[in-house]
Amino acid sequence: SQSSGKSSVLENLVGRDFLPRGTGIVTRRPLVLQLVNVPPRKPSRRTAASGSSDSGVEGLKDDESRPSSSPPSSAGSHKNYDMTERAQFLHLPERVFYDFDEVRQEIQRETERLVGSNKAISRVPIHLKVTSPHVLNLTLVDLPGLTKIPVGDQPTDIERQIRDLVMEYIAKSNTIILAVSPANVDLANSESLKLARDVDPDGKRTLGVVTKIDLMDTGTDALEILTGRVFPLRLGFVGTINRSQQDTLAGKPIQDALKYEREFFRSHPVYRSIANRCGTSHLSKLLNQLLMNHIREKLPDIKTRVNALISQTEQELASYGSPTLSDQ
């Protein structure tokens, strides 16, 4: 749901600021985010300044990088790009982004190209691949946050539109539902958990993420939630801490926020006993493990279907008989 901190969770998993920010519905098209881990290597650094043709965007040809024109950086600015981290959109296959600020801008441009600058939504997804030594292999889908009341020029049935879109994705039986809920709101009112329960009543494929644990009222904690005593889920709950809006505006690096998150859980008198099951790092590893388990589980069935198709094709070829030669 809106204000749950799901965008911050995704950015923490990637380790980069790359998602649009704002009030109201910010995610207005599904974002299919593919994270691809690559072995770490000594990064080559590239610096871009105002007036240069290199602004953190490249075109690719024959697996070689070559600069391509792009709007220059703001006047007087200098940025270092880690060449081991890159992003690529399916709708721009020839361009590779190293500047994640430009990734955010492209998401905004591509969203507005289809649905305009108002707060309407679309079912057509944006596909983004991020390659980095700092991520684990995952595929995530960011969906619009649930809203109750239309604002501005939003359609009157915006709540139904978003709900239908979310249900379209989470109803698939092979989907792991990441239900993000803020800790400073009663879990009984969590829209994400309500929707998850509609399609996964036994909680077999729902993973709960509890954000903003550091913002809970003094004297309260989320231990009962994180240990599954309040809302049992087969995959459990993971507690995380996001950067505040003030942190984001001040440009606090995500790595600093992740360090604070680790120290918070390790040193907190309530959470230190479960610190190894909290935080973004644990969430990333858990999601990766769930994906690997799912692949191993489905692989025999896939092999069976492929073998059946091969056998069917061979039988069809055999039915045509041996090839014959005719005199010309």
Image: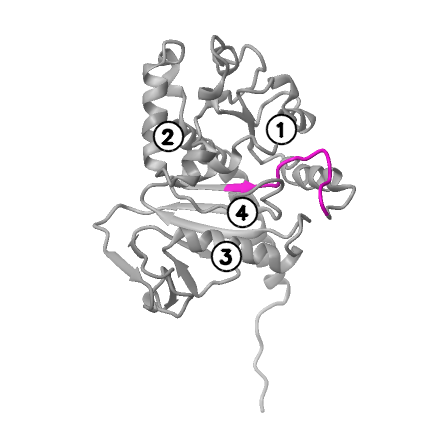
Badge 2 or badge 1: first in the primary sequence: 1
Task: Using the image, determine if residue 324 lies above or below residue 206.
Answer: below
CA gap, disc 2 and disc 3: 27 Å
Residue picked out by circle 1: 192
Residue at figure coordinates x 42%, y 44% from the top left: 17
Residue picked out by circle 4: 32
Locate residue 203, reporting x and y percent. Answer: 60, 22
Badge 1 or badge 4: first in the primary sequence: 4
Q: Please give the range of residues in magenta.
A: 140-152
Residue at figure coordinates x 71%, y 41% from the top left: 151
Dot 4 amino acid type = Val
Dot 3 amino acid type = Glu
Residue picked out by circle 3: 106
Q: Give the image quarter of residue 133.
A: top left
Q: Which mark is residue 5?
A: none
Residue picked out by circle 2: 281
Mark 1 residue crowding within 10 angstroms, few (<14) / some (14–19) / many (20+): many
CA gap, disc 4 and disc 2: 21 Å
Between disc 1 and disc 3, the foreground one is 3
Work out whether residue 315 can be spotted: no
Q: Give the image quarter of residue 115.
A: bottom right
Image marks 4 and 2: residues in contact by CB distance under 8 Å: no
Query: Closest to the observer: 58 or 75?
Result: 75
Query: Closest to the observer: 188 or 123?
Result: 188
Point out the image quarter for the N terminus. Answer: top right
Q: Give the image quarter of residue 163.
A: top right
CA gap, disc 1 and disc 4: 18 Å
Image marks 1 and 3: residues in contact by CB distance under 8 Å: no
Mark 3 residue crowding within 10 angstroms, few (<14) / some (14–19) / many (20+): some
Q: Secondary structure at mark 4?
A: strand
Dot 2 amino acid type = Ser
